[in-house]
Image (cartoon, rainbow, N blue to C red):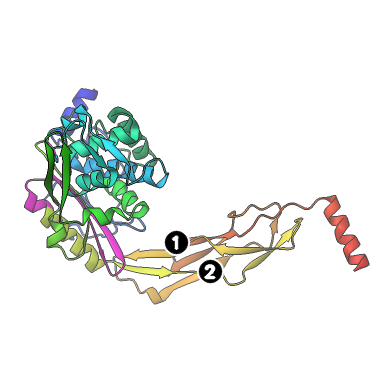
Amino acid sequence: MHILLSLLLCFQITLSSFLPLLPQPALEDDAAPVSVTAPSAILMEADTGTIIYEKNPHEMRCPASITKIMTLNLIFDAIEQGKISLTDTVTVSEHAAGMGGSQVYLEAGETQDVETMIKCISIASANDASVAMAEFVGGSEEAFVAQMNEKAKSLGMNETNFINCCGLDVEGHYTSAYDIALMSRELTLKHPQIHDYCTIWMDTITHNTARGSQEFGLANTNKLIRQYEYATGLKTGSTGLAKFCLSATAEKDGLELIAVIMGAENPKDRFSDAAALLNYGFSKCRIYTDDPKEGNTTIPIKRGKEDSLSLSYKNQFQYISVKGEDFSAITKELLLPEYVEAPVKKNDKVGEIVYMLGNEKIGSVELIAQQDIEKADFSHYLMRVFSSYFG
């Protein structure tokens, strides 16, 4: 069954009749709001994860080098966690140097720093650099791929299974447009510095090997970087089985969009499809943003060592509109209990502010405790009595 499933995936046979999926509906009701030639695509707003457009988004397909988005996620996770740094030296193994497909022709025993490897992956989609980094971060490519699948599961990527870290066609290696959008969103929101690398149009690296020192040019595989005004990344991919794929990110007037294209017939179609989706999103979407004011919001405490608890709002509120709603009609309601009973831990939810558009709830923001409040004991009450009596 596993072999049959993999063959079906790589030949892009639709599996909807075999695997019942529950796609999230796009916000737009029009049957064909924008023309997309590729068989599978999705458009997502990055901050909220709102789906603006979808076409077979849960169809599982060979992803080619789009795979490297997850590879980059784990690399930047490791940097953030202090496990590696941009200046660390990476030694290229025989296995990494032997990768086919897109590469920067690293040689076994050659060394490069982490930042150079990130450039090779982000700009030139280098398979050899991807495997070298997988071995550096995970100990082996196999161990690193296990981490990729674990990360995918944590992000809710239920239509994904990685077999390698670079995206070469292999049995059982697949994902979906929806899942690609999820890992693209994770990378761009959690590690926005990725844009510093994937927007580089051309660069060079230096190979220092037994044959001497030699410069090698890097050219960005994502032509939207030059062709689309608002492009900020992210990753291309193409193999014989995957055809031409793209996860394109763009930002305009504070709105960040992710357009994923899978299975396009040629490079031109994947870029034109992505540009069409991005243009559609920017023309249809508006963002309502509200930053609730903390002020001096407090609430009484019962049975606590303090009489009141200070509150703050957990986060900013955003609402994405694709239907031209009147934002002036949005109302807010503060929902708080009369009191809170101790003990209370810092960041505990105490209440919320609810946002309404007409009769529809469009979201909410939690009110959370600013500090710990311990439960009062007998000695505390006794001290209160003495304090009030002897004033």
Q: Position of residue 266 (x, y in %)?
A: 6, 47
> Residue visible at 61% across and 54% down?
346
Near-viewer residue (264 or 20): 264
The residue stretch that appears in magenta:
241-270
Note whether residue 13 is visible: yes
Near-viewer residue (142 or 19): 142
Figure quadrant of residue 237: top left
User: Neighbour class for label 2 at 10 Å: few (<14), some, many (≥20)?
Assistant: few
At label 1, the amino acid type is Gly
Asked if the residues shown at circle 2 and circle 1 are in contact, with their CB atoms under 8 angstroms apart, the answer is no
At label 2, the amino acid type is Glu
Mark 2 secondary-structure assignment: strand
> Residue visible at 88% across and 56% down?
382
Q: Earlier in the sequence, mark 2 or mark 1?
A: 2
Image quarter of the C terminus:
bottom right
Q: Position of residue 339 (x, y in %)?
A: 69, 61
Q: Position of residue 158 (x, y in %)?
A: 32, 38
Note whether residue 62 is visible: no
Residue 259 covered by magenta stretch: yes
Labelled disc at residue 333: 2
Image quarter of the N terminus:
top left
Q: Main secondary structure of the magenta part?
A: strand
| Lateral position of residue 14 relative to residue 371, left or right | left
Q: CA distance from mark 2 to mark 1?
A: 11 Å
Disc 1 designates what residue?
363
User: Neighbour class for label 1 at 10 Å: few (<14), some, many (≥20)?
Assistant: some
Q: Position of residue 49 (x, y in %)?
A: 34, 55
Figure quadrant of residue 36: bottom left
